[in-house]
Image (cartoon, coloured by chain):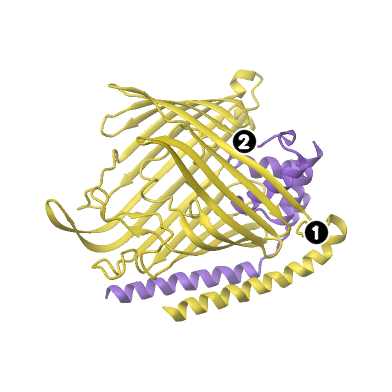
Chain colours: A purple, B yellow
Amino acid sequence: MKNRSKFKLFWTIVTLFIGSLFIFSACTSTNKIVAQESGAQLWSQKCQSCHNAPPPNQFSPQQWDVIIYHMKVKANLTKQEQEKIVAFLKQR
Amino acid sequence: MKKSYILLASTFLFVLGANCLSFQNANAQTKSSSGDVFSPGVTNFALLGEFDYGMNITKNSASFGAPEMAVMPLYRQGRFFFESGIGASFDNNGPALDVGPINLSYMLSNDWLIRVGHFDALPFGRYPRTYDPGWINPLATGPVGFDSIGGYDDFGFQVQGSGFIGNTRLRAFASITNGPQLSLDPGSQGMITSASVADNNKSKMIGGRLSLNPSLSSNFSIGVSEYYTGNVGNSGTQYDGVGANLLAVDMNWAPTVTSLDGFIRLRGQLNAVHVDKANYVDGAGTYTFKNNSSALYGMFAYQPSMSSNHFLQSLMFAFMYSRAKTPSGAKWDLSSTNQYDVGLTYWFNWRTNLKADYDIQENGQNALMLSVAMEL
């Protein structure tokens, strides 16, 4: 009985997981609303949702290039958001 | 079970392959305007870190704590991104070093990546993975129970990505890892603890987190995480085959409220851990229980960041309620099951703060906590 419920649970997770991946494969990587927002708006929104937004002059452009990847990994930023935010931060 | 892994792996490859193809098309379109950020010629390095120091004052004692610091070397080369962390603190035996995370990411496409290595906390909800660092957490302490019912480190493989369906953003993390282990230590028997490098059995943990951001103009998000492993016990022992299922639901909202001259933060998370029934032995004999435990917290914070008064602009007020529910029959030592925290934070700048937090516990062991934290 225990094994049977484990089996069911396992397949439920697998089904949900595969379903999620298929949904994602149908996703678009760009969005009109994000496209219309400026780098400054996205920087404020995305950073502020978890922590204070760092001012652009806190790091060099080379450092921002790496830190934005750290945040991409941490917060799953899309490339569209990543490029706009880093462009804003590098302007200083 | 082996067929399941094969199916899972095939699906990974299929979907990731599809995403790589879509990346090639998208990249061909964007290259001319923005350049290729994945160019192998681009190599960059950055060093981040954090510092945390605090003091606890209770009715009968006052104690300066141990300072903690961590440095995080980050390195990017083309599509590869490496991150690591080295922490230093003090315990009862003197200086203590802690290493982790150490992992390598590879950008499969614009919005999808894979990671291998050690993860300092699985994406099981968002606490502690995102909100625990002292320069982010507006309180000097974390929610009760979240260090033992959640926050598991692990070793393995992870795929993550994001995309849009209409104006809804989806984010996903999925992983195959060693999985947590069943603790047999007195005081925590039946609890599951973070994975170790040498797995205690052949079973792997699979699962992940899916989150939705239903309105792109606000930063409200809600996430669901689930992980499953068929075995957390040591192979060849009576605990071989004891499975575990982990569930978490989390939410986060941080809007700017112009009528309040500032912004608020609302966060919440519920963790539930289920471990199959097992027999445990201690000095008093054998006892049996099924580990159904849960921990939850809700936090509200407000900072009048648009106030005309400079001092007020830098203040943040926070309140947190947290609760941990331990299974009946367990002999765990959770110091409290209900905890209330009221805090006041002064921000010297965006990454340095001084916090005062009054911690009210159900067992009456209330404490005033003072701490200073800085992002390095």
Quarter of the picture containing the N terminus of chain B is: bottom left
Q: Amino acid at mark 2?
A: Asn
Residue situated furthest right in the rendering: B32
Q: Residues within 10 Å of mark 1 (few under 14, many from 20)?
A: some
- Residue B54: quarter of image: top left
Front residue of B221 and B126? B126
Residue on which the image places disc 1: B36
Give left or right: position of B213 versus B287.
right
Front residue of B241 and B81? B81
Q: Measuring 33% from the left and 45% from the top, which residue is drawn there?
A: B324
Residue on which the image places disc 2: A52
Is B259 situated above or below A44?
A: above
Is A32 situated above or below A21?
A: above
Q: Measuring 44% from the left and 61% from the top, which residue is drawn there?
A: B226
Q: In which chain is the residue bearing label 1?
A: B
Q: In which chain is the residue bearing label 2?
A: A
Circle 1 sits in a helix, a strand or a loop, which is it?
loop
